[in-house]
Amino acid sequence: MNNLTEHWIDYLNERYGFAVNAKNISKRELSQAFPELTKEEIDSPLEDEKFGLTFKVRPYSAECLKHMIDDGHEISIVTAHNNRTVGTKFDWLLSNFPFLSRNDIIITSKKQKIIGDALIDDAIHNLGGGNYFKILFDRPDNRDYDAKANGMVRVYTLKEAYEVIKEVLL
């Protein structure tokens, strides 16, 4: 739904004077891309309340989610939490996806606890072990991962994810 990794890298580049390109990162662990920074420095954007307000919405995400809802599907946005930025996350989601309500947003650090038909995520660790159909959203940092061998379907757009859901689950 948003550009977290790219935005995170842009933040670190600007703050610390680097020129790392998100497209060149093949692992989710940003310490490999920014070896000069401490873990605290790398994680600092996640503690910044303003960081989440400037995420860009991925193209067609809002339209696709609205289409799913209009087709009668119950949609829940499952997102990780940070006590300092949880309000910002709600604000960003509700302002960019006005057809959602606070009741449609689930904050958790363990997505495997969620019960549902499908989970779409770009982080492998969020999909593994869960009791739902697993859809891996393609990102440069997960391209080397064999989604199919691990019971996941790789997609490149939210529209494609919805097509997979309709084909497999309906």
Image (cartoon, grey):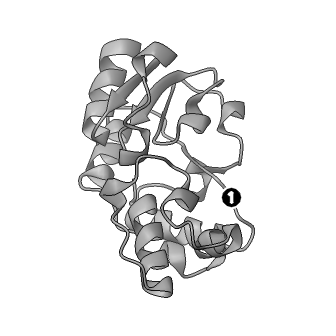
Left or right: 132, with 6 as reference point: right
Q: Nearer the viewer, residue 19 or 79?
A: 19
Residue drawn at x 62%, y 79% is 48
Say what secondary structure mark 1 lies in. loop
User: Visible in this render: residue 151?
Assistant: no
In x, y percent, where is residue 35?
56, 66
Q: Residue 151, position in %: x, y?
A: 49, 16
Q: Mark 1 sits on what residue? A: 81
Q: Is residue 121 above or below residue 101?
A: above
Q: Where does the image place residue 158, in percent across and percent down from the top left?
A: 31, 41
The foreground one among 27 and 129 is 27
Is residue 142 positioned above or below 89 on the image? Answer: above
Please name the residue shown 59% across and 58% down the image. 102
| Residue drawn 39% across the image and 60% down it | 3
Q: Quadrant of residue 23?
A: bottom left
Residue 101, horizontal then vertical, whole percent:
53, 57
Amino acid type at circle 1 is His
Q: What is the quadrant of residue 21 in the picture?
A: bottom left
Residue placed farthest to the right in the image?
83
- Describe residue 4's horizontal placement relative to residue 56 as left or right: right
Estimate how packed mark 1 is, as few (under 14), some (14 to 19) or many (20 or more) residues with alpha carbons within 10 Å.
some
Residue at the spot x=26%, y=38% of the render? 159
User: Does residue 125 appear in this view?
Assistant: yes
